[in-house]
Every structure is written in C-alpha cells, then in structure tokens.
C-alpha cells in the first residue's frame, strides 16, 4: 500500500510530454496570430500614409496653381479635352517617409501621378453688356474649377483620390 501511494505521488510531479506539446502548440498559434496582426497593422499604416501623402500632394498642387492666379493658365500648356475642360501634363511627385517601428529602420517611398483638369464654370461667369451690343454681349469667366486626381500604386492596384478647388 505504501509503495502504491509513492507511485501516485511521483506521477503528480512536473509536466508530461503531452502537456508540454499542447502548450508549445498553443504558444505557436498565438505567436502566428500576433505576427499576422502586426502585418495587418503595417499594411494599414502604408495605406493610410499613402492616402495622406496623396491628399498633401493634391492640396500643394491646388495651392501652387492658386498662388499663380487665373491669368497663369494662359501661359501653361493646356490640352483641350474636347468637352470644355483642359488638362495639364501629368506629373510625377515622389514622397518619402522614414520610420522605425521596431529595431529595423525603413523608408517608405511613394510615386504619385498627378493629373489636373481645368474647366470654366458657369457659376463663375459674369455677363455684361451695353445698349449698343445687347444685354449680355460680353461674358467673362473670373474663376475656374480645378480638379486634381492623384494616383499611386498599392499592393498591385492603383489607388486614387480627387480634390477640387476654385482658382480666381
């Protein structure tokens, strides 16, 4: 009887090989899940950083055109689209961000393609006239609508945003 109690007590000490294997499997699955979560977070960061950069590029283009004023459009090389709108030559703008999410520093570099479409809008048209020439003989556009489309590559597809503004 005494020997049998010693055997039962010796079996209760420590961990068995099956318990260790199950614990290792559970820890491995948790580690894989955390790695997948981190990968998803990095992808979300890249997507958000790309969109924020595109917004900045679009706003900078509108601000640049606005600072030059409406008269500068006569000097630019505009291409007639045939539908009452005109386009500027597409341009490429590169933005870079440096980061260090862990122990490894990295640089994000994104090439943005900027397309600008300019159109006169009837909202910004002033009609003047005289008794000699008629009531609305002269029309003058005092502002133009500018639509800026910025696109960039992300994971094998092309993402884009559009920002509109008015240049007086």
Image: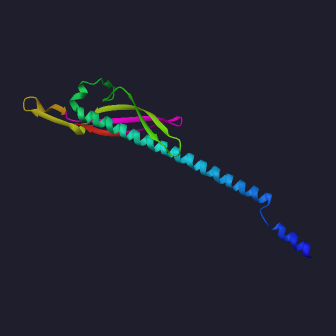
Colour scheme in the image? rainbow
* Residue 37 as seen in the image, left or right of residue 21: left
| Residue 6 position within the rendered picture, expressed as x and y whole percent measured from the top left | 87, 71
Could you tell me which quadrant the C terminus lies in? top left
Residue 76 location (% of width, % of height):
27, 25
The rendered magenta stretch, by its main secondary structure, is classed as strand
Is residue 10 part of the magenta span, yes or no? no
Q: Position of residue 25 (x, y in %)?
A: 72, 54
All told, the count of numbered labels is 0
The residue drawn where x is 75% and y is 57% is: 20
Q: Residue at x 11, y 33 (%)?
A: 129
- Residue at 53 percent of width and 48 percent of height: 41
Q: Is residue 85 above or below residue 51?
A: above
Question: Furthest residue to the bottom?
Answer: 1
Q: Is residue 155 magenta?
A: yes
Q: Nearer the viewer, residue 56 or 23?
A: 23
> Left or right of 149: which side holds 167?
left
Q: Position of residue 96 (x, y in %)?
A: 43, 36
Q: Quadrant of the N terminus?
A: bottom right
The reply to whether residue 9 is in sight is yes
Q: Is residue 120 visible?
A: no
Residue drawn 50% across and 40% down? 105
**Magenta residues, as a range?**
141-162
- Looking at the picture, does residue 11 appear above or below residue 39? below
Q: For residue 75, what is the image quadrant?
A: top left
**Residue occupying the far left of the picture:** 131
């Amino acid at each position: 009887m005494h020997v049998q109690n010693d055997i039962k007590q010796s079996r209760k000490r420590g961990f068995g090989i099956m318990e260790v294997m199950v614990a290792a499997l559970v820890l491995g699955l948790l580690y894989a899940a955390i790695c997948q979560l981190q990968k998803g977070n990095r992808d979300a960061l890249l997507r958000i950083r790309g969109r924020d950069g595109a917004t900045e590029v679009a706003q900078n283009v509108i601000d640049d055109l606005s600072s030059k004023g409406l008269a500068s459009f006569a000097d630019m090389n505009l291409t007639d689209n045939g539908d009452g709108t005109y386009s500027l030559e597409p341009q490429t703008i590169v933005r870079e961000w440096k980061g260090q999410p862990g122990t490894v520093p990295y640089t994000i570099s994104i090439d943005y393609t900027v397309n600008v479409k300019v159109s006169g809008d009837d909202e910004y048209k002033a009609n003047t006239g005289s008794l000699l020439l008629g009531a609305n003989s002269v029309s003058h556009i005092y502002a133009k609508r500018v639509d800026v489309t910025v696109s960039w590559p992300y994971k094998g597809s092309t993402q884009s945003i559009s920002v509109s503004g008015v240049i007086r």
